[in-house]
């Protein structure tokens, strides 16, 4: 699912050779690693509560991130900040998004939970119209409405039968909350990047989330061993290495070239659902998920689509 965490810093280090091919390969690797992280979170949720998963995901992600910053000579000097309050606000929004995301993963197939992650840019459309007085084009507005209709389709199976599907309702509600908090976190990230390095933002985000997860320990944690412990630790390392792969991809290719490959998340999720859990969403839920993802793609690439149409015309 889409990530609200920033990539690691690409400044103050030797420039990478410009290579779209290697950049795309690394972006695909990052998407795959994030998908593996989501899979491990879902597997861990069988025994471990969400707060414990958040702790392991954040604490163990710090290890590869710190190693990467040391490699580029940005630790600990790169962690100095003049805006601790801004980091705390951004991290709290991001941490809330992580909690909601993991709840959604615990209750929904990976494909549906991943699709809900693409709602964040769609929610930004009405927010920009109301608060920033922006006037997006008809294609963007139409795509936003289509995305919300997709969510209705995803919810429909929960109301099919004599009783509500509790897991679908909880999972979709958490996914919607995740999209809202992710959008808020992205606003805070944009404000912070005016003065703060990406590595600083990523580091403090992981620290705050680890502390927030640790704070849930008195509520009861599992005592994981064997594969359960492996799922928890693996989720953290997968998330950390995914950040590194994404950063290296951005160092080699333009962000506009890499952006479309984020949508391969759905392919990974569908494959894991089928191969590991032996399930697929209902046809209506799957159709809704595809509508949401397609709508998010239209919003992301609306400007390019308009330019292409104008050239053809």
Image (tube, rainbow, N blue to C red):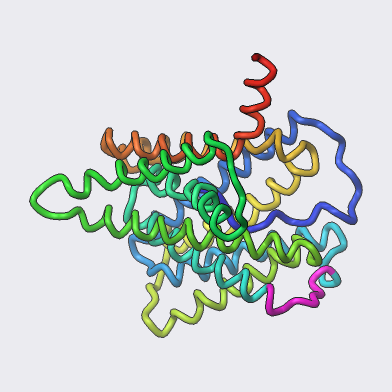
What quarter of the picture does the C terminus occupy?
top right
The reply, left or right, for residue 226 in relation to residue 302 is: left
The reply, left or right, for residue 131 in relation to residue 311 is: left
Identify which residue, 86 or 232, lies in the foreground: 86
When asked about the image quadrant of residue 270, the answer is: top left
Q: Is residue 186 above or below residue 24?
A: below
Q: Is residue 57 above or below residue 172?
A: below
Q: How many marks?
A: 0
When asked about the image quadrant of residue 154, the answer is: top left
On the question of residue 170 being in view, the answer is yes
The reply, left or right, for residue 246 in relation to residue 283 is: right
- The magenta span reads 78-86
Rendered residue at 89%/53% (across/down): 13
Give percent across and percent down for residue 299: 56, 39
Rendered residue at 34%/54% (across/down): 172
Identify which residue, 183 or 1, lies in the foreground: 183
On the question of residue 43 being in view, the answer is no
Give percent across and percent down for residue 188: 65, 65
Rendered residue at 73%/66% (across/down): 192
The reply, left or right, for residue 300 in relation to residue 38 is: right
Give percent across and percent down for residue 15: 89, 44
Question: Is residue 85 shown in magenta?
Answer: yes
């Amino acid at each position: 699912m889409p990530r609200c965490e920033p990539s690691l810093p690409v400044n103050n280090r030797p420039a990478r050779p410009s290579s779209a091919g290697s950049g795309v390969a690394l972006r695909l690797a990052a998407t795959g690693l994030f998908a593996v992280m989501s899979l491990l979170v879902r597997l861990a949720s069988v025994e471990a509560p969400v707060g414990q998963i958040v702790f392991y995901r954040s604490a163990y992600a710090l290890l590869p991130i710190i190693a990467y910053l040391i490699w580029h000579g940005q630790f600990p000097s790169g962690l100095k900040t003049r805006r601790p309050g801004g980091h705390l606000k951004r991290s709290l929004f991001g941490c809330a998004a992580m909690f909601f995301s993991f709840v959604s993963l615990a209750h929904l197939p990976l494909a549906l939970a991943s699709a809900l992650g693409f709602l964040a840019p769609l929610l930004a459309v009405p927010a920009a119209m109301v608060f920033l007085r922006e006037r997006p084009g008809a294609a963007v507005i139409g795509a936003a409405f289509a995305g919300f209709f997709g969510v209705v389709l995803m919810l429909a199976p929960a109301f099919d039968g004599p009783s509500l599907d509790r897991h679908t309702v909880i999972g979709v509600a958490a996914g919607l909350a995740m999209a809202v908090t992710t959008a808020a976190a992205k606003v805070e990230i944009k404000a912070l990047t005016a003065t703060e390095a990406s590595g600083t933002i990523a580091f403090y985000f992981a620290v705050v989330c680890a502390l927030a997860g640790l704070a849930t320990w008195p509520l009861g944690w599992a005592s994981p061993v064997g594969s359960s412990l492996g799922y928890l630790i693996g989720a953290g390392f997968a998330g950390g290495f995914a950040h590194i792969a994404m950063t290296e991809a951005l160092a080699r290719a333009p962000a506009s070239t890499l952006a479309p490959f984020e949508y391969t998340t759905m392919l990974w999720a569908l494959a894991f659902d089928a191969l590991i859990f032996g399930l697929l969403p209902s046809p209506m839920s799957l159709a809704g998920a595809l509508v949401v993802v397609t709508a998010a793609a239209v919003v992301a690439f609306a400007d390019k689509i308009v330019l292409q149409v104008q050239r053809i015309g």
